[in-house]
Amino acid sequence: MAPSRDRSFLDLEGATPLKPLVGFALLTLCAFAVHPQGSDWRYVALAGLTFAAGAGLAWIGAERDGWFALAPAIAAIAAIAALRESQGGATSGYSPLVVLAVVWVALMLDRRALLLITACTALTFALPLVLIGAPDYPSSGWRGAILLTIVALVVGEVAQRSVMNIRHQTVEARRRSEELEEMHRAFGAMAGVAREIALGSEARELVCTAALTSLNATMATVVEPRETGFTITGSAGIPLDRSQIRRVEPVASLQAFHTSRRIFIPNAAQDNRVDQTIVRSTGLVSIVYEPILRDGESVGVLAVGWDSHRVVIDAKTDAIMRFLAAEAGASIERADLLAQLEGLARSDPLTGLANRRSWNDAIASAMRDQTALCVAMIDLDHFKQYNDEYGHAAGDRLLKASAAAWRSHLRSDDVLARIGGEEFAVLLPRCSLTDAADVLERLRRATPSGVTASIGVAEILPDEDPNDLLARADAALYEAKSAGRDRLLAAS
């Protein structure tokens, strides 16, 4: 919310006082029209000129701050004083009109202006009593002067308090409206997050970006428990690489996670629950930790920080934080589900190995590197006979056990895939045929449950097509089986 411009105490937030001035002028003209016979027209004319001068000053200073705003009211009081003199002084019926000037000031200006115009009103009644006196202004007029001054002040106070309450309510309504607009924009951003997640984007990064945008924050992170500890899984606005902050002790995050309650730290540099390395590198001053809940249980923490001091969490920030955390929980759940579905679509459900789709992608990627590459085909010997003798459940256990045993002898970037039935394929990037033979012999000997395996291996030739490479490895496997099984043969 943009701060309002500072204005003088006599300016009504830039409002032009001409409309109430016109209304007051009409009342005064009506007073002129109904004046009793025998009025002294010299003072009537003086009253008109005085009021006209005040109106002229108001017109000139309509767009200015300061004393010009008081000109109509002061001129009106002076005009009323002249009208009183034109009708014989204290006995004139014009005296109560000063209340109009006071009320006008109370409605348009502030308390200091109200006290000033009330003082002018008191002088309007007091000066004739002191300087002119009887018979036009007898001493008995003091009672009426004091009474009218008090009445004018009380009426002005009541009117001003009413107006100030209305103004306060208007400002509060405008503030709430702006907060709702900002929240609407935040909700729109989060709706965009949900759409992006549906398209497979990174949910945690999008949540953090939405937090920065909707809360005008400096940084935002999503922290979740992992096997290696409490880990930053999403971030925005942090100038450090995540590898640089893996050793951060997330004390405040852990506290928010375990208690499922928000933690607000207004002075991060003075709180030992916040790692000071992050504070110094990001310039954080205030930070809030909002637990991310799923079915009432904490699954993570959304941390949002600012580089400016915040004493409290206002209603707008509170609402947006709650919404972001709730949406983060749902978004992360959807993203994790999509990742699981993607993993299932690319893996063999029985052994957990790569399936044919993943295998095709892996071999295509490895061949683009144009480095040494070997491919092997593995087949469990007499697997159909094993199934017939021990049953399909035992056959499934054999497949899983074989996959686990073989995988334990491979490097992290090697690929073991089940491409159908009891047939497996092995991708060995950056591996010569001699080295591949050593690895594959270990795999053959590791086959569990007394079962044997036949293996055929082929090393890629210059400009060879993936299908041709697989065909040569498969041909080598066929030769191994034809030669009596339980052996490794290399393609020629």
Image (spheres, grey):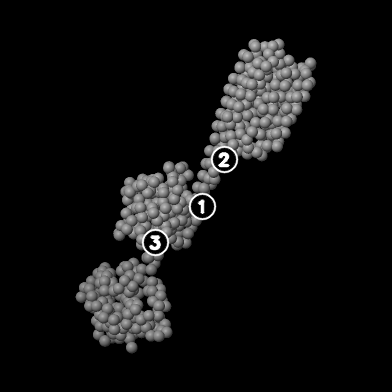
Query: Amino acid under label 1?
Result: Gly
Horizontal placement of 447 versus 157: left or right? left
What is the C-alpha distance between the residues marked 2 and 3?
44 Å
Query: Residue 239 sits in which quadrant?
Result: bottom left
Residue extending furthest left?
450
Q: Nearer the viewer, mark 3 or mark 1?
A: 3
Query: Amino acid under label 3?
Result: Asp
Q: Tell me the tag on residue 6.
A: 2
Query: Amino acid under label 2?
Result: Asp
Q: Is residue 3 above or below residue 347?
A: above
Q: Is residue 479 above or below residue 428?
A: below
Q: Residue at x 69, y 15 (%)?
A: 132
Name the residue that disc number 3 marks.
241
Residue 30 seen by the camera: no
Question: Tag 1, which secondary structure?
Answer: helix
Q: Residue at x 62, y 32 (%)?
A: 108
Q: Residue at x 25, y 85 (%)?
A: 484
Residue 273 in the image: state x and y as whole percent: 33, 49
